[in-house]
Amino acid sequence: MRAQLYQTTPTVATASTMSLSPSFPLVVSSFNYEGDDEAEEQFEFSIGEELLLDPNDIVIGELIGEGGYSMVFKGLFKNQVPVAVKVLQPSQTSAASKHQKEKFQNEVLLLSKINTNNNIVEFYGACIEPSLMIVTELLEGGTLQRLLWDCRPTPLNLKMSLNFALDISRAMEYVHSNGIIHRDLKPSDLAHAKLADFGVAREETADTMTCEAGTYRWMAPEAFSREARQGEKKHYDHKIDVYSFAIVLWELLTNRQPFSGIPNILVPYFISKNNERPSLRGIPNEAVPILESCWAEDPEARPEFEEITVLLTNLLTTLCSEGSIAATTLSDEANLDEIDEEQTTVVLHEECSCDPVRRPEEKKKMKKKIMKKVANMIRPIFKMFKGCLSKP
Ligand SMILES: Nc1ncnc2c1ncn2[C@@H]1O[C@H](COP(=O)(O)OP(=O)(O)OP(=O)(O)O)[C@@H](O)[C@H]1O
Ligand SMILES: [Mg+2]
């Protein structure tokens, strides 16, 4: 089965026909969907009328993000409210499988349930036809992932990092108090510090939670244990989110990729088999116990988000109050030791714009160090090349 995502002729401007507004840039995109018999299976949606929007009220604009299950567009609701429109794949409801419809319904119901928190994206409603669409507040300014990439390898200002972490912790406190496990907490699902994706979130039940969810670099070891990968059921609870939070906090403090150099698919093996965690080098001493307790192997040893919020608030006071020496960033040495090729490329192409405390002379010094590091990296290649040229 083949489904065309968007018509390319911008004649009708609403989501009801899934074509484009002339006022928005054209999005020419096709999505090939190899349908299966599941798509034909019946599924009765049980989403309350009050949560459903009229697709004629939604104008679809430019593509602003893509996830594993969806394409996200800028949109305009009732011709006046800027929104984000998440179109689940496949783009036509008739081609969606029972599982995809269930997943969509789950996300809609959870979003509508936890829609009153400042640190969680605001939910406006959903459409079932012609596509499975979720309409939310448009979060400008990009994801936390983007912010980190744009600054890499320079860490964010410490105060900024801890404030982000605190917002995430507060949002998670609220999510857990509603009996929901997020299951896929990671920087690309955070618009700065707002939670924006509940695609694989679940209501926590007394039953067994299975482990199809999450993204390996941020996933707790119990979520992909050996038994679970072999398809057996495995118990885990809301503490898997605390583990993921620890990895996000580590990224905020270091601005390095977790388990850099290890392919995503091998991360589960690496962290379960060797009980490895990211390096604590350069992390302020006071932050170490928080990281270590949050990524503890035993989920019961991990704190609740309520406790994490208190710990982070205290940490902010200790490290970032007026006159504190630690209130800047981690040392340049710590970063430069860990620079990998991918990170170096980013530095060479982008000016860091997110570290208000770094002075021009410090930046210059750092640039010099990076250039030296790059020169050291390419010197052997250059030598080989020169060797070839000088051969008769
Ligand atoms: N409300 C929003 N405002 C602005 N951009 C958004 C919004 N929601 C999502 N995005 C962008 O779209 C991307 C994909 O969205 P989302 O993570 O919800 O999709 P997904 O299919 O569940 O992805 P995955 O399962 O890979 O996390 C995000 O990383 C973000 O860049
Ligand atoms: Mg996502």
Image (cartoon, rainbow, N blue to C red):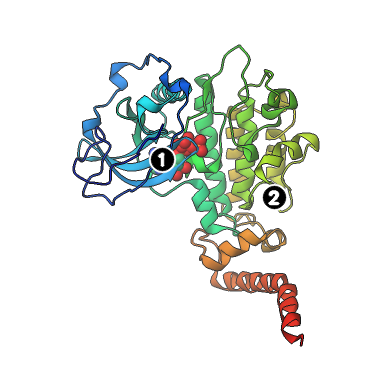
For this rendering, which residue is in front, 210 or 304? 210
Is residue 193 among what the camera can see? Answer: no
Could you classify mark 1 by the number of other residues whose Cα lies within 10 Å: few (under 14), some (14-19), or many (20 or more)?
A: few
Task: Tell me if 360 is positioned left or right of 228 in this view.
Answer: left
Task: Give left or right: position of 32 versus 213.
Answer: left
Q: Is mark 2 within 8 Å of ligand 1?
A: no
Q: Residue at point 77% right, 85% down?
A: 391
How far, Cα to Cα, is label 2 from label 1?
44 Å
Q: Which is more N-terminal, label 1 or label 2?
A: 1
Can you give x and y, in whole percent of width and height, for residue 211 in the image? 63, 25
Residue placed most toward the observer, 148 or 228: 228
Identified at 71% across, 43% down, the residue is 288
Please tell me whether residue 53 is drawn above or below residue 317 in the rendered image.
above
**Label 1 amino acid?**
Phe
Give residue 97's quadrant in the image: top left
Residue located beneath label 2 in the image: 283
Q: Which residue bears the numbered disc 1?
A: 31
| Horizontal arrangement in the rendering, residue 251 relative to residue 129 (left or right) | right
Q: Does residue 266 appear in the picture of this structure?
A: yes
Tell me the amino acid under the disc marked 2: Ile
Mark 2 surroundings within 10 Å by alpha-carbon count, few (fewer than 14), some (14 through 19), many (20 or more): some
Q: Residue furthest right?
A: 274
